[in-house]
Amino acid sequence: MDKQLVFSFPHMGDYHVVIRSMLGELFPGQKVISAPPTTQRTLELGSKYSPDFVCSPFKYNMGNYIEALEAGANVLLQTGLGCRYGYYGEVQEQILRDLGYEFDFLCFSRAHVKPEKIYRVLRNLECPLSMREILSVMMRTAESLRIMDALDYYVRENVGFETIPGSFEKLQKQLLKDLSEPRTMLQLERLKQRYARAAGEIPVKKSAMPLRVGVIGELYTLMEPFSNFYLEKQLARRNISVSRRMSVSFLLFGKKDRISLRESGGYLKYTVGANGVDSVCQAKQYAELGYDGLIHMKSFGCIPELNVMPALTRLEQDYGMPILHLSFDANTSEVGVETRLEAFADMIDMRRKKAYGTARVSGG
């Protein structure tokens, strides 16, 4: 190839840091850029050139692609998943070409992610690495994602109780900086231990029985904080311990559908697409653990998550655990979401007061 390749991909949380590092290893000598941070302009751009009733992840991705192309990208990547998202790549590519952009587009849906196909595509893009070297990069990338997700999980549960504001956020930013450069497996193991120790040393003022809320739902809306108005931070500001199991690590190494279906306790008889079964399975686990409430998030029109709502309603009735359902699209009001969230937090706090004779036992 005569031209320099400039790779880019859509945003989803902070995962772009690890993915950019991975692509840098796979294509030494080429350029890898993260799309500009997701903003309201991103959503407006994506919505302008997307079908009206398509789900919001499609629109966010479109906005990310356009801004990446504006920044000089000429190779775009997409990974399809187990719902309509798996078909979005081809549609997005055609829309972008109709807009006059010139680029190469690589879509790795679940149906096409086979080692020999990936290797062939990488070689066509002049990846100089052997199959063994490529596997090494993938394994180290997976471990980096595990480390990142493990810290994030701990932070969600504890950030609402930190005694020095910003301590956990500072630690997360430092980890992202450390993960932005290639590491050996030994270095990653040491990094994991160091950050686990550092997180545990951050002072928190947390009671033995804090208010606890589980978060379940459609993966993009859960993992891209801009798309849900930074809901987890809003909960933390109300001194609530937040648990969310859905992450890229969960997608790569979590339970198979048949296992989650069995552990859903009869609330579902069949798989419903994407990670809908996981939503029900996790909701049941949170209920059995005595969580004070559950928030179910999805993009507007997400079929798998719509399919599980009757099961979640039955679960809510059986366990007496309140569930707040939130849908997000390009026109969702941030004020409306904040109002519902505030009312939900007050409600579970009053339920706690009625049950134990004290409210806001989690207060920091």
Image: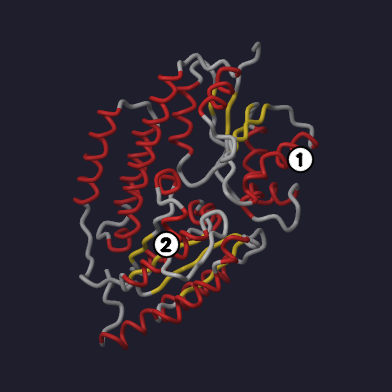
Which residue lies under the disc numbered 2? 262
Is label 1 in a helix, a strand or a loop? Answer: helix
Q: Amino acid at mark 1?
A: Ile
Give how far across and how far down residue 120 sits, in percent.
57, 21
Give how far across and how far down residue 181 sits, in percent.
38, 28
Residue drawn at the location 39% of the way across and 66% of the way down: 214
Residue drawn at the location 24% of the way across and 49% of the way down: 199
Give how far across and how far down residue 242 sits, in percent.
36, 63
Does 275 sit left or right of 284 as displayed? right
Depth check, front residue: 248 or 232: 248
| Vertical position of residue 139 compared to residue 317: above or below | above
Which residue lies under the disc numbered 1? 95
Q: Amino acid at mark 2?
A: Arg
Q: Residues within 10 Å of mark 2 (few under 14, many from 20)?
A: some
| Vertical position of residue 346 compared to residue 168: above or below | below
In the image, farthest residue toward the top: 2
Does 148 sit left or right of 340 as displayed? left
Give how far across and how far down residue 359 sits, in percent.
30, 82
Depth check, front residue: 139 or 167: 139
Instruction: Tell me the quadrant of the picture where the C terminus can be found.
Output: bottom left
